[in-house]
Every structure is written in structure tokens, then in C-alpha cells.
Image (cartoon, helix red, strand yellow):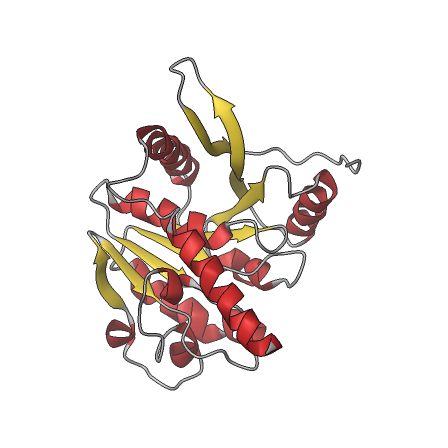
Amino acid sequence: MAFTRRKKEVRLSINQSRKFILSDKTQFVIKEAYKTARANLVFSLAACESKAVIVTSCSPAEGKSTNCLNLAITMAETGASVLLVDGDMRKPVQHSLLKLDNKKGLSSILGGITSDVGKAIKKNVRENLDVLTSGPIPPNPAELLSGKRMSELLDIVSSHYDYIFIDTPPVTVVTDAFLMNEITAGIVFVVKEGSTTHIEINEALQKAKMMNAKVLGLVKVNCNYKGKSGYSYKYKYHYNYEYKNNSHD
């Protein structure tokens, strides 16, 4: 009974998350907020050789997967070719959010099960947006992400895509997001208003500093903001975050 209830809870969570995926029905102010985030991200990446961006969060349930997807969608709307990679091989959700088959994916490539990258990638999930799902959950996700094959994979896809977004697990839980520092442009943190604490943010930023990871910015979500236009929305963005040692909550 408990297992069945848990499966229902997961399905409910996925269905709720799908409501926040950008579409023609998304409010104008929310779309504009993502466009602002896109503009700041493009500016941050201008001087970077790599155009691969890691998206993560401080803790679970902060919306990092949905926002990684939305950032990829927003970037693809410019006409740029974009690849979304589900690098969360512990609790992957991108295939569920997008209703995609996940029999083959990132773990299949990194684990040597398949060498055909092109066949593993789902094409045109949205206009200009392709997706590489996580694949079956492997026993050694950290080793796969830090291995030579991950570097080789990014080299291959970087020659075909203008931007690459990699969804990774929360950094206060595991260090997967920091394992690709040398082969990506940097990290974007998703933080949730009313959920993520200052302590968690500082812990994440301290870990990034120790791992020599470049923090491109913070995406703050679930904000209740009312602008001069009278519109209300729950997305707000802060980029080029400067690290500060502030340990109080």
C-alpha cells in the first residue's frame, strides 16, 4: 500500500511540474522573466569557450529540473540549437516531464552500452530543442560523469549545438554537479523562495568555491512579485552572484 501511494505521489508531482513548463498558455510576464534570464545568461557565457551550462540546486524539490528545461526552451526560441541533457542519473525526471522514452540515454552512452550518440538523442522535442534523457539509472553516476566519455560526449555535441543545458542533482546531497567543472562554462543555481535557506545557499557556494566551479548565477523561483504593470508572477532572476561568506539564516 505504501509503495502504491508513493507512486501516486510521484505522478502527482510530475503532473504539477508539467504545469510550469513554458507553453503558449504561459503568462506573458513569466515568459518575459525567462527572457531576462536568457539575456543575462548569454552575457555571462559571452567570454566562455564552452557553452555547456550546469543547472542544479542547493537542496531537493527546488524546481531545478523544470527551470533547466524552461531555460533550454527559452534559449531555443532565439533560433539557437539547444541540447538538454538529463545528468541527474539518480532521480531523473526530464523524460517524465516531456513524456519521452528513457530506455537509452546518457547512462547508455557513458556506460558503453551504445556508441551512437545521434540515436540516443531525441530530436525536435521542441523547435530547435533536442533532449538526451538520463537512460537507465546506473550504479555509479558520479564515476560516469567524471569519466573520459563524458568529456568526449560534450566535445561531440558541442560541435552540433549552440548551447547545452545539463540537469544535475542538488549539490548539498551529492557532488555530481561539480564533476564537470573543467568541461563546462559554469553552474546556475535554482533557489526557491520560502524554502531554500541562507545556510543552504552559502553551503552550496562554499562547495563551489572549494571545487573551483564558476557560478554563472542564481535563478530565484516562487517569488511573489507585483510590478508597476499590476501583473504578479513567481519568477525572479539574479545573475553574476558574488560569493559572500554569510552563514546566518
Q: Nearer the viewer, residue 202 or 231?
A: 231
Q: Is residue 192 left or right of residue 110?
A: right
Q: Is residue 214 above or below residue 220?
A: below
Task: Please identify the residue farthest to the front as the structure is shown.
Answer: 1
Q: Is residue 99 left or right of residue 65?
A: left
Q: Within the image, what quadrant is residue 245 found in?
A: top right
Is residue 90 visible from the viewing direction of this image?
no
| Residue at 51% in and 57% down | 182
Give the mark count: 0
Q: Nearer the viewer, residue 204 or 42?
A: 204
Task: Please identify the residue farthest to the right as the structure is shown.
Answer: 248
Q: Nearer the viewer, residue 4 or 178?
A: 4
Q: Is residue 146 above or below residue 137?
A: above
Q: Within the image, what quadrant is residue 110 found in?
A: bottom left
Task: Please identify the residue farthest to the top as the structure is shown.
Answer: 228
| Residue at 34% in and 30% down | 32
| Residue at 45% in and 65% down | 11
On the image, the x and y values in percent for residue 40 come to 41, 32
On the image, the x and y values in percent for residue 68 come to 42, 50
On the image, the x and y values in percent for residue 246 come to 76, 34
Q: Is residue 144 above or below residue 87?
A: below
On the image, the x and y values in percent for residue 52 come to 40, 53
- In the picture, which quadrant includes the C terminus? top right
Q: Is residue 171 above or below residue 219?
A: below
Q: Is residue 159 left or right of residue 87?
A: left
Is residue 172 visible from the viewing direction of this image?
yes
| Residue at 33% in and 34% down | 31
